[in-house]
Image (cartoon, coloured by chain):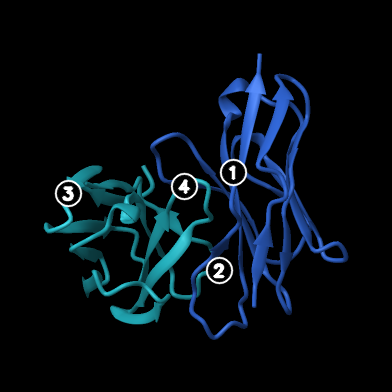
């Protein structure tokens, strides 16, 4: 079974400081990993993905994520947070060898609050 | 604008009503999904369609009935829902390989009274 864990319900960061939103996964084999952001009353927006290659992945709005196979983690990072980054962030995983279809499994989400 | 459009954006219905949610994508994708998002819970995958064929049904009650008439359209027919079915219902689409993730619509906020 595949699963994704986001251990923090909420992350608070001051504007201008670096931010990290944590994600760990459990998938047999080589996973496809994703980060999505959700603003209030909106659907999910794709931020970035890791399929293969360089462990550091750069995405939209200055976000990046680092794939760490030994720690089975895919933490989302940004060097300098903005108030407008405040939103709900979801980590997701897909097992390319799974027979259960093509869908993503999502973590429960982490609420990011960036204060001025 | 993600290329996935859901209508209506908001829906209030009684427990005896019948209503339908609509999803449309013009991205050339051939897999479509329904997810349910409830407060304080992870996104729950409900249904997956690939090439217009249902390939996954995650133990969803029969009061939810999906329909995929073609690769661009997906419906969720609702009948005799319960108040606990109130949630944000999200539609998504992807290539059948799924390696590029999924694109989501903005969701339909459903309230069952």
Q: Which comes before the other along the chain, label 2 or label 3?
A: 3
Please determine whether, in this image, residue B85 is positioned above or below residue A113. below
Residue placed farthest to the bottom in the image? A99
Residue at the spot x=45%, y=66% of the render?
B45
Earlier-in-chain disc, 4 versus 1: 4
Q: Is residue A73 left or right of residue A114?
A: right
Q: Position of residue B53 (x, y in %)?
A: 30, 82
Chain letter for mark 1, please.
A
Q: Which mark is residue A44?
A: 4
Residues at marks 1 and 2 touching, judged by CB atoms closer than 8 Å: no
Element type at mark 4: strand
Where is residue A110? Give x, y as percent: 63, 43
Q: Indicate the chain coloured cyan by its letter.
A: B
Chain where mark 3 sits: B
Out of A36 and B87, give the one closest to the viewer. B87
Q: Could you say which chain is coloured blue in the image?
A: A
Q: Position of residue B5 (x, y in %)?
A: 28, 50
Residue that label 1 marks: A89
User: Mark 4 and mark 1, same subunit?
Assistant: yes
Residues flagged by tags 4 and 2 on a common chain:
no
Q: What is the distance, in whole Å, between disc 4 and disc 1 at their CAs? A: 9 Å
| Residue A116 horizontal/vertical position (percent) | 66, 13
> In 3D space, how far apart are the residues under numbered discs 1 and 2 (Cα atoms)?
20 Å
Relative to B26, A95 lies left or right: right
Question: Label 2 neighbourhood size at 10 Å, few (<14), some (14-19), many (20+)?
Answer: many
Locate residue B99: give its quadrant.
Answer: bottom right
Q: Which residue is mark 2?
A: B99
Is residue B109 left or right of A69 when viewed as pictured?
left
Residue B13 is marked as 3
């Amino acid at each position: 079974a595949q699963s994704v864990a986001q251990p923090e319900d909420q992350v608070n960061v001051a504007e201008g400081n670096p931010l990290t939103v944590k994600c760990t996964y459990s998938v047999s084999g080589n996973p496809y990993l994703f980060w999505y952001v959700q603003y209030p009353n909106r659907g999910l927006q794709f931020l970035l993905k890791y399929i293969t290659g360089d462990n550091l992945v750069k995405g939209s709005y200055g976000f990046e994520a680092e794939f760490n196979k030994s720690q089975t983690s895919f933490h989302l990072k940004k060097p300098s947070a903005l108030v407008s980054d405040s939103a709900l962030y979801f980590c997701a995983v897909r097992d390319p060898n799974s027979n259960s279809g093509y869908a993503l499994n999502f973590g429960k989400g982490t609420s990011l609050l960036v204060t001025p | 604008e993600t290329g996935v459009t859901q209508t209506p954006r908001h829906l209030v219905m009684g427990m005896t009503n019948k209503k339908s949610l609509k999803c449309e994508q013009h991205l050339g994708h051939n897999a479509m999904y329904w997810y349910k998002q409830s407060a304080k819970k992870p996104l729950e995958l409900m249904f997956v369609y690939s090439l217009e064929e249902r390939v996954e049904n995650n133990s969803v009650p029969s009061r939810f009935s999906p329909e995929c008439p073609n690769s661009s359209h997906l419906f969720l027919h609702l009948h005799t829902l319960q108040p606990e079915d109130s949630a944000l219902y999200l539609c998504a689409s992807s290539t059948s390989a799924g390696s590029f993730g999924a694109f989501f619509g903005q969701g339909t906020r459903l309230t069952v009274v």
